[in-house]
Image (spheres, rainbow, N blue to C red):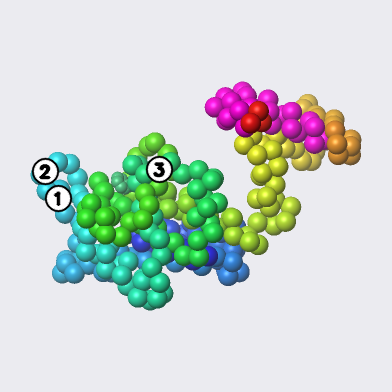
Amino acid sequence: MRIDILTLFPEMCEAVLSESIVGRARRAGLVDIRTHQIRDYTEDKHGRVDDAPYGGGMGMIMQPQPIYDCFQALCAETGDRPKLIYLSPQGRPLTQEIVEARAKEPHLALLCGHYEGVDERVLEEIADEELSIGDYVLTGGELPALVLADALARMQPGVLSGDVCFTDESHFSGLLEYPQYTRPPEWRGRAVPEVLLSGHHANIDAWRKEQSLRRTEEKRPDLYEAYLREQKS
Ligand code: 4FD
């Protein structure tokens, strides 16, 4: 899949997207993620992309023209019209379900707002969806866009190695992960649970399922209730 990020901070995005699993996936051609500097499209002779809000009030608002022209240039270059997702605190809360649905799209564009937001008219004109990564406010939409791009990239075929493949996540679906251990078998007086060293795979699976249930009940009673309801139906 291809993801185009429209931002005032492409270097911040590139820094994150060049590292680790996403960086490797990009270099391997498993996902095509590109960043675009919105400021390159301003028609203002001083390079401005923001202005004071009509009606008064705090802060600055991103003007519609540079964002619109940046998106039009992208459409012209690729010869298609990707779905554009605007990251904002007012968006629909992002979930793994949304990630898995959008990961099937061949091409997405992500718009990162800054200052106190974006002129409403350009959103009406080009935004297909508004998503939020949680109920808190950040200085810009870059971190939310990077969160979404990472979550989308790891769903692409070949990005995760076979033994940590995302299909494992649906194993006890709707429950939290069970605790994991590696060597050494004893550390600071703490032993690895004996069943994990037993080689008895049925017992290990049963222990992990029980741990997932107990942790979900303890840490996320909302998910636990949903899981129980799902089991009954
Ligand atoms: N919770 C999120 C997204 C963006 C953001 C911004 C309007 C502020 C948090 C539009 C106001 C964008 C989120 C930039 N903060 N800040 O997903």
Looking at marks 3 and 2 on the same chain, the residue that comes earlier in the sequence is marked by 2
- Identify the residue position indicated by label 1 in the image: 52
Rounded to the nearest angstrom, the CA distance separating label 1 from label 2 is 7 Å
| Residue 196: % across, % down | 83, 35
Residue 104: say if magenta. no
Q: Residue at x 77, y 27 (%)?
A: 190
Residue 217: say if magenta. yes
Disc marking residue 92: 3
> Looking at the picture, does residue 46 appear above or below residue 200?
below
| Residue 189: % across, % down | 78, 26
Give the residues in magenta: 204-230
| Residue 82: % across, % down | 41, 65
Q: Main secondary structure of the magenta part?
A: helix
Foreground mark, 1 or 3, reads 3
> Looking at the picture, does residue 95 appear above or below residue 118?
above
Q: Secondary structure at mark 1?
A: loop
Residue 34: quadrant of the picture: bottom left
At label 2, the amino acid type is: Gly
- Identify the residue position indicated by label 2 in the image: 56
Q: Are marks 1 and 2 in contact (CB under 8 Å)?
A: yes
Q: Residue at x 72, y 56 (%)?
A: 162
Visible residue check, residue 230: yes
At label 1, the amino acid type is: Ala
| Residue 49: % across, % down | 22, 60
Looking at the image, which is closer to me, 194 or 145?
145
Side of 218 relative to 39 (left or right):
right
At label 3, the amino acid type is: Arg
